Image (cartoon, helix red, strand yellow):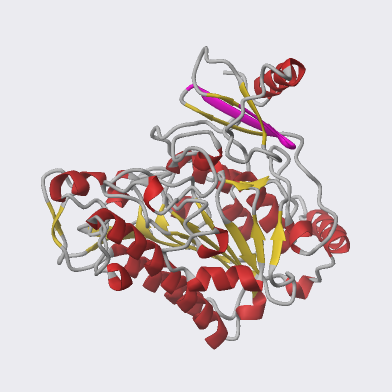
């Protein structure tokens, strides 16, 4: 048998090197909570300019931590965005670049499996989308000690499902009944988001005495498209709360109530960490999986959900991929700071590895943004890349190239002066277009 002592010594040496570069000590290894909304836009939060929907708790996270203004989702739709987040590879290098069916092969290296190997308790709630029951892709085969929520992506579009999954055990919700299309609720008793929150809090309580990683991939404010067509309201929520008397269409009341409900639960999560004396030992990330949707009869323009950005979900303009990112870590991140560092979902894996003292895999596209969080010198990406159904986009510093379909000309925007991508500068800068075309080709794995 080969001794693993040299490996352990090497790991310690690497960890010490990481601590030297970031200023972290071994005892500072934090709990990590990564909260992700579903289809929330760059402009849906008060701290990003929202004027109508109330998000006081998320806004307070920004006041107590760091708010990123140049952060990008892994993709413009759900499944590939989650794939990018977990693997640290952008969509030019992942097996899928659209919402096609995909199951993780067993024992894939992900941020979760790496943290588990380092001794973290690993838990997740919400939408999984990367492996159905009895497949190799279920969370329990991908580094999760505990999972509660949806496994199949399509089922996650119904907020009153007949069942959810606890690891690989089906949990019946007998008060909920759906119609023949399986996405239209005809009897409603248990709102799935509330169960997800309960299980997330239970996981925190159960692991309060050890380092833990919690992935809370919530399903709101995604639309229930089938329910919208059937009932006229595709934004399922138990009550409209502060918005019930507004003279708005029902879907807009529902959308606002969903966002505020999620905000309420983020506040409750922070209170739980305070109660357990874990607040200073825990780093919280909050983001969205892609840009805002225009589904379930919700209109992006109603609340200006994409803020100053062009486009929305399924676009590779900024509105489809630029998302909020707020990070709070008391006593480590300077409160009330704003960062314009250009980062993306594929950067989370190396960031989490650096937080935990792990050497990240070699074959990733991400760069840890922990130095930025700690106010230190931060390495930047040369380029960032996305692709979706024949569309491609590449950012290189201030320049953004977008191709809206096969055979379409490459558009060019200066995001420093034109965040709304209103002035196509391709004709004025053919040399930049040519260079970015080469970088787009180089960003994609050979078929």
User: Is 426 positioned to the left or the right of 124 in the image?
Assistant: right
Quadrant housing residue 226: top left
Towards the viewer: 272 or 377: 377
User: Is 51 positioned to the left or the right of 193 in the image?
Assistant: right
Towards the viewer: 246 or 370: 246
Quadrant housing residue 6: bottom right
Which corner quadrant holds the C terminus? top right
Q: Residue 164 lies in magenta, yes or no?
A: no
Q: State the residue at coordinates (48%, 47%).
A: 306
The image shows residue 370, relative to residue 429, as above or below, that is: below
Towards the viewer: 127 or 425: 425
Q: Residue 391 lies in magenta, yes or no?
A: yes
Q: Is residue 369 visible?
A: yes
Estimate the x, y position of residue 287 in percent, counting from the top left: 54, 56
What's drawn in magenta, residue-wise?
Answer: 390-401
Towards the viewer: 199 or 415: 415
The image shows residue 284, relative to residue 377, as above or below, that is: below
Q: State the residue at coordinates (79%, 54%).
A: 7
Mainly helix, strand or loop, the magenta region? Answer: strand
Q: Is residue 75 visible?
A: no
The image shows residue 433, relative to residue 413, as above or below, that is: above
């Amino acid at each position: 048998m080969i001794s693993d002592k040299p490996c352990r010594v090497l790991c310690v040496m690497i960890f010490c090197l990481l601590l030297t570069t970031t200023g972290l000590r071994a005892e500072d290894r934090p709990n990590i909570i990564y909260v992700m909304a579903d289809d929330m836009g760059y402009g849906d939060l008060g701290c990003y300019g929202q004027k109508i929907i109330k998000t006081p708790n998320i806004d307070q996270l920004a006041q107590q931590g760091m708010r990123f203004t140049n952060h990008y989702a892994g993709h413009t739709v759900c499944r590939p965005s989650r794939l990018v987040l977990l693997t640290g590879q952008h969509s030019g290098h992942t097996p899928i670049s659209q919402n096609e069916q995909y199951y993780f092969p067993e024992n894939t290296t992900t941020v979760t499996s790496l943290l588990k190997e380092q001794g973290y308790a690993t838990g997740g709630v919400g939408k999984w989308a990367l492996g159905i029951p009895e497949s190799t892709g279920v969370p329990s085969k991908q580094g999760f000690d505990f999972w509660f929520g949806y496994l199949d992506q399509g089922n996650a579009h119904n907020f009153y499902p007949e069942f959810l999954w606890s690891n690989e055990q089906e949990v019946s919700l007998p008060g909920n009944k759906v119609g023949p299309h399986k996405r239209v609720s005809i009897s409603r008793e248990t709102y799935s988001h509330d169960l997800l929150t309960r299980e997330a809090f239970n996981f925190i309580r159960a692991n309060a005495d050890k380092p833990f990683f919690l992935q809370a991939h919530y399903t709101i404010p995604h639309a229930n498209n089938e329910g919208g067509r059937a009932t006229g309201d595709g934004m399922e929520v138990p009550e409209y709360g502060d918005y019930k008397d507004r003279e708005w269409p029902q879907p807009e009341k529902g959308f606002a109530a969903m966002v505020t409900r999620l905000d309420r639960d983020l506040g409750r999560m922070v209170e739980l960490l305070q109660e357990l004396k874990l607040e200073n030992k825990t780093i919280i990330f909050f983001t969205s999986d892609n840009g805002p949707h225009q589904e379930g009869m919700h209109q992006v323009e109603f609340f200006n959900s994409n803020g100053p950005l062009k486009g929305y979900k399924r676009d590779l303009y900024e509105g489809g991929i630029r998302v909020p990112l707020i990070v709070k870590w008391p006593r480590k991140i300077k409160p009330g700071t704003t960062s314009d560092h250009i980062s993306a979902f594929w950067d989370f894996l190396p960031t989490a590895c650096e937080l935990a003292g792990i050497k990240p895999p070699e074959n990733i596209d991400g760069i840890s943004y922990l130095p930025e969080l700690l106010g230190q010198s931060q390495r930047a990406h040369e380029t960032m890349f996305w692709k979706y159904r024949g569309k491609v986009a590449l950012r290189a510093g201030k320049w953004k190239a977008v191709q809206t379909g096969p055979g379409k000309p490459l558009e060019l925007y200066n995001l420093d002066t034109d965040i709304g991508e209103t002035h196509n500068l391709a004709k004025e800068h053919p040399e930049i277009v040519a260079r970015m075309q080469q970088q787009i080709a180089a960003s994609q794995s050979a078929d």
